Image (cartoon, grey):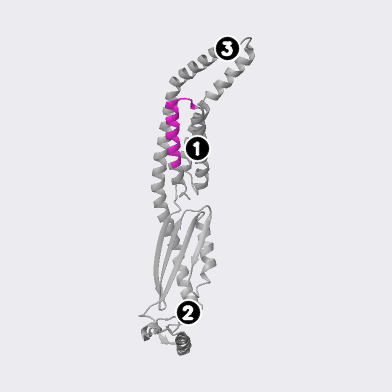
């Protein structure tokens, strides 16, 4: 089963006068890169999250964000007078310094001051979250990861269909290349004969053994059957990977490199316009397939 590294999941919850929203986003990466953004006081969740994510994911750049807020209906907010005094004193100092530089600041409203962190809150912003709230947050983690993996699986199903289509196209181009070999062999033979006759007409005492060796070398260089056989083997390997269990992205990426290597060799040895066109078409489809494979886990 093909899984994509691209995915999104979100879970919301509420408990003990708090509401929260989890969000997970994933894009492709060479390895597993976890980026956790947790609110102050929720640091105890980080090792739990990293362990749970590493157990379920193998690759991808994964960003996890937790937004935690007070539930207005569940928490009686209070005024932190000490924090307010600190902020007002700082504002007075700023205004005095601004006057010294002949700068005139806009007056702050009470609503703006109350919106500052720590002035009006249901608890200190940097206080550790209570154990029962942490337990409620931890309970969301399995469902969040399940939803994220399901999203990556859905994206992977679409990727799988695209990859299958590319593999079918590559297989058809390999067949077309084999069909083109018959006419190509006749043309290559005629070219060799013409060149050989030119050499014989302008050379005295040609060594028959050396001549046979050179002809054999030309024949080997012109033969592309081995490249086509390897391409067919790669097609079979790609089909097997699409039905394999577990992460296949790294193996598939390596396989696309092997595909491209054989296509390059085919083009360099073709010495035939029709076969070269097929080789270039192969390279185009292989490049398209490799781009899609970059998102496979």
- The percent coordinates of residue 288 (x first, y second) are 43, 42
Q: Secondary structure at mark 1?
A: helix
User: For residue 277: magenta?
Assistant: yes
Q: Earlier in the sequence, mark 3 or mark 2?
A: 2
Q: Which residue is mark 3?
A: 202
From the viewer's perspective, is residue 51 above or below residue 241? below
- The percent coordinates of residue 172 (x first, y second) are 40, 32
Q: Residues within 10 Å of mark 3 (few under 14, many from 20)?
A: few
Q: Which residue corresponds to the image point at 41% horizontal and 45% vertical from the top-left? A: 160
Q: Nearer the viewer, mark 1 or mark 3?
A: 3
User: For residue 91: magenta?
Assistant: no
Query: Relative to the observer, which residue lies in front, 143 or 196?
Result: 196
Query: Relative to the observer, which residue lies in front, 120 or 88?
Result: 88
From the viewer's perspective, is residue 297 above or below residue 109? above
Q: Secondary structure at mark 3?
A: loop
Q: Which residue is mark 2?
A: 125
Horizontal side of 202 relative to 89 (left or right) equals right
How far is mark 2 from mark 1, CA to CA? Answer: 56 Å
How far is mark 1 from mark 3, CA to CA? Answer: 41 Å
Magenta-drawn segment? 270-287
Query: Relative to the observer, which residue lies in front, 69 or 189?
Result: 189
- The percent coordinates of residue 223 (x first, y second) are 52, 24
How far is mark 3 from mark 2, CA to CA? Answer: 94 Å
Q: Which residue is mark 1?
A: 260
Q: Nearer the viewer, mark 3 or mark 2?
A: 3
């Amino acid at each position: 089963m093909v899984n994509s590294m691209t995915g999104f999941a979100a879970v919301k919850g509420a408990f003990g006068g708090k509401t929260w929203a989890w969000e997970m986003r994933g894009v492709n990466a060479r390895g597993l890169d976890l980026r956790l953004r947790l609110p102050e006081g929720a640091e105890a969740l980080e090792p739990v999250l990293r362990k749970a994510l590493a157990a379920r994911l193998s690759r991808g750049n994964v960003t996890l964000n937790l937004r935690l807020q007070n539930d207005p209906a569940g928490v009686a907010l209070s005024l932190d007078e000490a924090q307010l005094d600190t902020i007002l004193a700082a504002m007075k100092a700023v205004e005095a310094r601004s006057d010294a530089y002949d700068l005139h600041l806009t007056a702050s409203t009470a609503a703006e001051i109350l919106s500052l962190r720590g002035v009006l809150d249901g608890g200190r912003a940097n206080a550790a979250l209570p154990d029962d709230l942490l337990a409620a947050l931890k309970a969301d983690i399995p469902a969040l990861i399940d939803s994220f993996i399901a999203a990556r699986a859905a994206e992977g199903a679409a990727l799988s269909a695209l990859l299958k289509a590319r593999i079918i196209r590559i297989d058809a181009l390999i067949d077309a290349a084999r069909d083109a070999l018959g006419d190509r062999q006749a043309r290559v033979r005629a070219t060799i004969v013409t060149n050989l006759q030119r050499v014989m007409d302008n050379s005295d005492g040609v060594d028959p053994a050396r001549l046979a060796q050179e002809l054999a070398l030309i024949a080997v260089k012109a033969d592309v059957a081995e490249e086509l056989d390897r391409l067919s083997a790669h097609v079979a390997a790609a089909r097997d990977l699409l039905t394999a269990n577990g992460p296949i992205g790294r193996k598939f990426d390596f396989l696309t490199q092997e595909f491209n290597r054989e296509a390059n060799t085919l083009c360099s040895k073709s010495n035939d316009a029709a076969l070269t066109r097929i080789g270039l078409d192969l390279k185009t489809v292989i490049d398209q397939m490799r781009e899609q494979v970059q998102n496979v886990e």
